[in-house]
Amino acid sequence: MNAEIEKIAINKENALENAELLAELAALSREWAEEGVCPGYYANDAEEYFDKELYIARIEGKTVGYALGHIRVLEEKTSYNAVGEKAFELDELFVTKAFRGRGIASALFRFAENDVRNRVSVIGLTAATDNYKPLLRLYTDELGMRFNHALLVKRTDNTEKENA
Ligand SMILES: CC(C)(COP(=O)(O)OP(=O)(O)OC[C@H]1O[C@@H](n2cnc3c(N)ncnc32)[C@H](O)[C@@H]1OP(=O)(O)O)[C@@H](O)C(=O)NCCC(=O)NCCS
């Protein structure tokens, strides 16, 4: 069964009527944090969904994934933008484990891309993940993003630092 993708605008004023959805999103975010695959990811508070570009994927009425982002004006010139251009930053993309591998993340991304395409000239994201190879394949090969830069780290004392 295909997921239905929908754009939802949540804010302080309509939070109460969206309480059920906010609870589902909070549960997905907790699941993501507990999965422990994205260093530094912490479960969201409800307010983090307010006044954002939010897209949800539903299967039989149940929210199984979401994409969350925001639009900002780029204040510095880089190799891919001029000063003053607008960018959609994809802050979060998550699909619950049981529904992975059937194109839901790709569908969420494409839906978001279509939705923002007339409002921005760039889509960007920063990914922190221990599972970067399949993720890079998804963003570059499947979704047409260009790889721009990477930050690689190695601790010299051979310890894994706890997420601070
Ligand atoms: C990354 C993620 C959103 C992909 O969701 P999905 O609905 O399974 O993705 P799709 O079905 O549209 O695309 C599948 C592709 O995703 C990539 N992928 C698969 N499992 C993955 C995983 N565990 N982590 C990262 N990428 C993965 C692969 O490229 C895969 O393509 P393939 O099947 O040809 O190998 C999902 O695995 C997830 O929520 N992971 C945890 C959160 C996360 O890492 N989010 C991105 C951080 S910015």
Image (cartoon, rainbow, N blue to C red):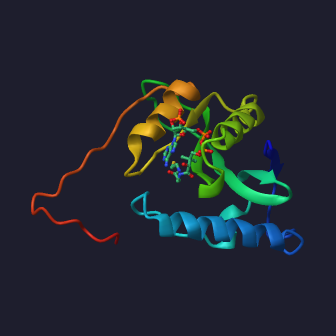
Relative height, residue 74 to residue 147 (above, below): below
Q: Residue at x 36, y 34 (%)?
A: 149
| Image-quarter location of ligand 1 | top right
The picture places residue 39, in percent across and down from the top left corner, at: 39, 60
Q: Is residue 123 left or right of residue 6?
A: left
**116 is higher (above) or lower (below) than 127:** above
In percent of the image, x 75 and y 52: which residue is there?
56
Q: Residue at x 45, y 38 (%)?
A: 134
Q: Which of these two is toward me, 91 or 62? A: 62
> Going by the image, does 37 lie left or right of 50?
left
The outermost residue toward the left is: 157
Q: Position of residue 14 (x, y in %)?
A: 87, 68
4 over 84 or under it: above or below: below
- Does any portion of residue 154 appear in the rendered image? yes
Q: Which of the 4 image quadrants contains residue 164? A: bottom left
The answer to whether any part of residue 81 appears in the image is no
- Residue drawn at x 41%, y 51% as measured from the top left: 129
Q: Give the side of residue 157 with respect to residue 162, left or right.
A: left
Q: Quadrant of the N terminus?
A: top right
